[in-house]
Amino acid sequence: MIKILEIDDNNNSNVFKHSEEVDGQSVKVKNGDNALTDLIYDYFDKKDQIVVDAGGGNDSTATIELIKDTGVPFTYIVPVGSSMAQLENAKATYDLISDPKNTIFALNGVHDLDNLENEFPFWFGNVELGIESFAQTVKSDALIIKYTPLFELAALDGITINELAQFSHGLDKAQALDILYKESKERTEFKRMKNKWTQSIQSVRYLDEILKQFKKIKTQRNIAVVSSKGGVGKSTIAWHLAKFILENQEQ
Ligand SMILES: Nc1ncnc2c1ncn2[C@@H]1O[C@H](COP(=O)(O)OP(=O)(O)OP(=O)(O)O)[C@@H](O)[C@H]1O
Ligand SMILES: [Mg+2]
């Protein structure tokens, strides 16, 4: 079982009301220690795995300390956007974690893979503009997490992108349309289901790409998604992807 814990004073990202795969809770930093200790007890007891979604801002410093204090192995994922400010936060987060071997950066919200270096000039550097490469400074590769509306579409239905992917599982379009036609009671319902099927097919493709990257990386049994910057995609990665990544890894 994979358990997700959000430690954040301002947010509650547990919007997955219809999800059967997300067993998550959201707590404030002052309750983080207690909640983590509970999870770690279960981790030892039943071999659960833990995913932490750490809040931004001041929360993240305290949360990183809490995670380090647990003494159990974590891989840290630090999402970064394209701006210099975001990379400065990523660097500060990286230094706070101070566990380079177990820290992975994720370029989040990538629009065009063929134009990656222009989209993330502060990560890759740009000689003409006199921008140093952050990647070279930290001597690290990064995961690529593309922009997709599917995260928010899935969340709107109260499920993860992985559950959205399962909706179309094993069916080709003709079979799917046939089932959808029989199942839906009227035209608008049929259209809605057809859209969902398309979303689902795209989710399958999206997750395949994510998984290919993780086949090359070996993570610890637990994942913490952290950054001192707000809005960089921590919750998206933690709730939609971390469980999927852990479940599809050879341990
Ligand atoms: N790869 C992506 N593709 C599309 N939308 C994304 C992606 N990553 C994040 N988003 C969207 O960007 C917004 C911010 O992302 P998210 O809530 O995951 O950030 P966060 O780091 O957890 O923020 P906070 O610090 O406020 O907790 C959300 O609306 C989310 O759906
Ligand atoms: Mg969040």
Image: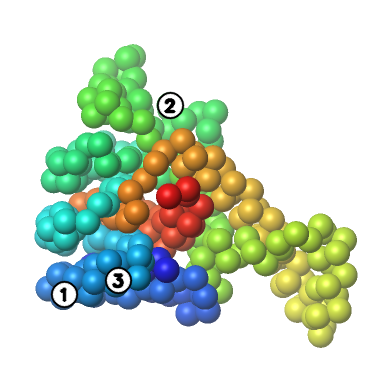
Sort mark 1 into few (<14), some (14-19) or many (20+) by Cα contacts within 10 Å: few
Residue highlighted by disc 1: 34
Q: As shown in the figure, which amino acid type bears the numbered disc 2? A: Glu
- SS label for mark 1: helix
Gap between marks 3 and 1 measured at Cα: 17 Å
Q: Is residue 115 visible?
A: yes
Which one is nearer the viewer's eye here, 229 or 65?
A: 65
Q: Label 3 amino acid? A: Asp
Mark 1 belongs to which amino acid?
Answer: Asn
Residue name at image x 59 percent, y 46 percent: 208
Q: Residue at x 29, y 55 (%)?
A: 224
Q: Are marks 3 and 1 in contact (CB under 8 Å)?
A: no
**Distance CA(mark 3)–CA(mark 2):** 45 Å
- The colouring scheme, among rainbow, by chain, secondary structure or one colour, is rainbow
- Other residues around mark 2 within 10 Å, as few (<14) / some (14–19) / many (≥20): some
Q: Nearer the viewer, mark 3 or mark 2?
A: 3
Helix, strand or loop at disc 3? Answer: helix
Q: x and y percent of residue 35 in the render?
A: 21, 74
In the image, is 18 to the left or to the right of 177? left
**Residue wearing tag 3:** 45
Residue 172 in the image: state x and y as whole percent.
Answer: 81, 57
Q: Is residue 176 above or below residue 244?
A: below
Residue at image mark 2: 117
Quick one: SS at disc 2?
helix
The nearer-to-camera label among 1 and 2 is: 1
Q: Quadrant of residue 200?
A: bottom right
Residue 156 image position (x, y, % from top left): 52, 72
Tell me whether the residue at label 3 lies in contact with that at label 2, contact meaning CB atoms closer than 8 angstroms.
no
Residue at the (27%, 42%) spot, across then down: 102
Q: Crowding at label 3, few (<14), some or many (≥20) Cα neighbours within 10 Å?
A: few
* Nearest to N terminus: mark 3 or mark 1: 1
